[in-house]
Amino acid sequence: MRTRLMSVAALVVAVSAISVVPSVAAAVSEQDVMFVKSAHQGNLAEIAAGQDAQKHATSACVKQVGAVLVRDHGKLDADVKMLAGKLDITLPATPTPEQKQELAAVQAKAGTAAYDAAWLKTQEAAHTKTLAMIDRELKAGQNSEVVMAARAARPVVAMHLHMVRGGTCHAGKDVGMVKAGTGGQLAAADDGSFTTGGAAWAAGGGLVAALGGAWLLRGRRQSAGNR
C-alpha cells in the first residue's frame, strides 16, 4: 500500500510540473521591451488627446470619443505600468516628440470645426499605428505576459479605430471598456469563463485530481480482493 501511495505522489508531482510549464514566462526580448515602452507612450498620448478633445472639440460626438480614450487608455496604461514594474522595464515619462507635435498641431485649431476634423484624422492615424505595433508584438514577442498584454489590448484599440475611421466620428461604436487583463495577465472572458491560460491551469489540476483518485481507488480494490 505504501508503494502505491508513493507512486500516486510521484505521479501527482510529475503532472503538476507539466501543468506549470505553460505559465513560465520566457525571457524579455528587445521586441518585448520596445513594445511595453511604446505602448506606455501611446497611452499617455491618447489620454492627453482625449482630455484635450473634451475641452476643445465643438461636437458632442468628438467630446464623447475623447472621454472613451481617457477611460480605456487609462486602464490599459495601469496594466502596462504594472507589467513594466514586474519585468523591471523603465518607462518613458512622456509621449514621443512626434506625438507631442501632432497634438500641438491639433490644439492650434481649438474651438473650431477644423479642430474636430484634425483630431479625428490624427486619432485614426495613431490607432492604425498602434494596431500595427500590437500585431508585431503578437508575431515576434517572446515573453508570454507581454504578448498576452498585447493580445488583450488589441480589441480596445480596434474599437477606438472604428470610432474615428475615415475621419468621421462614431461615438456609437463604444461598447464599454473591453476587458484588458491586469498587468499582462489574461482576463476572464465576457461570458465569465476563463481564457486559455486559466483553462489550461484548471485542466491540469483536474487531471492531477482525476489520476490520483483513480490510483487510490485501484489500490483499495486490490487490497479488498486480497483479504
Image (tube, rainbow, N blue to C red):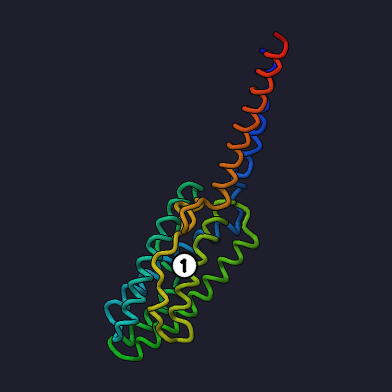
Residue found at x 37% / y 80%: 104
- Residue 134 drawn at (x, y percent): 56, 66
Q: Locate residue 99 relative to residue 27 in the image: left or right.
A: left
Q: Which residue is mark 1?
A: 156
- Residue 217 drawn at (x, y percent): 65, 23
Quadrant of the rendering where the N terminus is positioned = top right
Q: Nearer the viewer, residue 191 or 49?
A: 191
Residue type at mark 1 is Val
Q: Locate residue 78 relative to residue 18 in the image: left or right.
A: left
- Residue 43 drawn at (x, y percent): 42, 66
Q: Nearer the viewer, residue 79 or 226?
A: 226
- Residue 62 drawn at (x, y percent): 34, 81
Q: Residue furthest top?
A: 227
Residue found at x 60% / y 56%: 30
Quadrant of the rendering where the C terminus is positioned = top right
Residue found at x 67% / y 30%: 14
Picture layout, residue 16 above or below residue 51: above
